[in-house]
Image: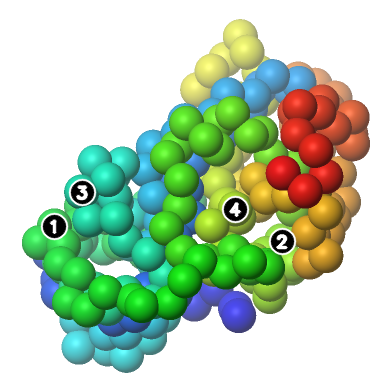
Amino acid sequence: MQTPPPIALSAGKIPWSGILLGIQPRIDLSRSFDQRQHGYLGYLLLVDGEAAGARRTFTVRIGPAAQARHQFRSGDRISGVAAHVESREREVADFYKAGELTVVERSTATSSASPPWLGTPPALEVYRERGHRRLDSRTYEHACRTCQWGSRMAVEMVVDPWNPGAVKRRFETFCYGPKSCPLYRAGATRKVPGREGMPYEEEDWVDDEATSHRSEDD
C-alpha cells in the first residue's frame, strides 16, 4: 500500500467517513546526534472512505482521550470532521483537529492472532514500555501500515546543539511488535547529521538494548 499524496482541501473543518483499516500510535521523535527523545502524543487512524466528497485512503490524528472514549478498533465504520494539516514536513497525518467522532458501526471481528496485528491498540504507556526497533520503510508501506505495532514518526534533528534553531526533518518507521514477527525487516541503519558534517550512525545494538527486556514472542 503506497502512501497517498496530500489531500488538496480548503481551510477549515471538513467531513470524513469510512472503514478504519488500522490504528497506530502517533509518536514524534527528536534527535540530537546520539541522543533521542520521544513524544507519545496520541493515535493515527488509517481510514478507507471519503473526505470532503473525495474517495480515498487517508489518515486522521486523534488524542489519547478520544481513543479512550471511543475505543476505536480495526474494521469500525467511523465518521467525523477535521482540518487539513498545515505542514506536511512536520506531520504524519493528512488531517488533524478531529471532532464529532462517531462509531457508525462497530466491527464484530476479533483481534488478529498473526501479523499484521489488528484490533484495539493498547495505551500509549504500553508502547513506551515495550521499546521499538527500526523498521524498513518499504516493509512498513507494504506489510505494516495497518498493524497496531507499527509507527511512522515525524523526526526533528538538531544538527548543532549550540544552534538549536538549525534543524532537519524527515520521517522514520519503527516496530513495537514481537521480535519473532515474520514480516519484520530492519532495513539500513540510520545516520543522524552532526556538527561539521560528522554523522552519528545508530547501529543494531541500540534496538537490541531498547527491547532487551522482551522475549522473542512478546
Sequence-wise first label, 1 or 3 = 3
Sequence-wise first label, 2 or 1 = 1
Label 4 secondary element = loop
Q: Is residue 58 left or right of residue 140?
A: left
Q: Evaluate if marks 4 and 1 touch, with contact meaning CB atoms under 8 Å apart.
A: no
The mark found on residue 99 in the picture is: 1
| Residue in view at x 10 percent, y 61 percent | 100
- Write down the residue under mark 4: 149
**Residue in front for this viewpoint, 138 or 200:** 138
Q: Amino acid at mark 3?
A: Arg
Q: Is residue 128 left or right of residue 58?
A: right
Sequence-wise first label, 4 or 2 = 2
**Residue in front for this viewpoint, 128 or 30:** 128
* Quarter the C terminus occupies: top right
- Write down the residue under mark 3: 69
Q: Amino acid at mark 2?
A: Ser
Sequence-wise first label, 2 or 3 = 3
Work out how far the residue at label 1 is from the one at label 3, CA to CA, in angstroms.
13 Å
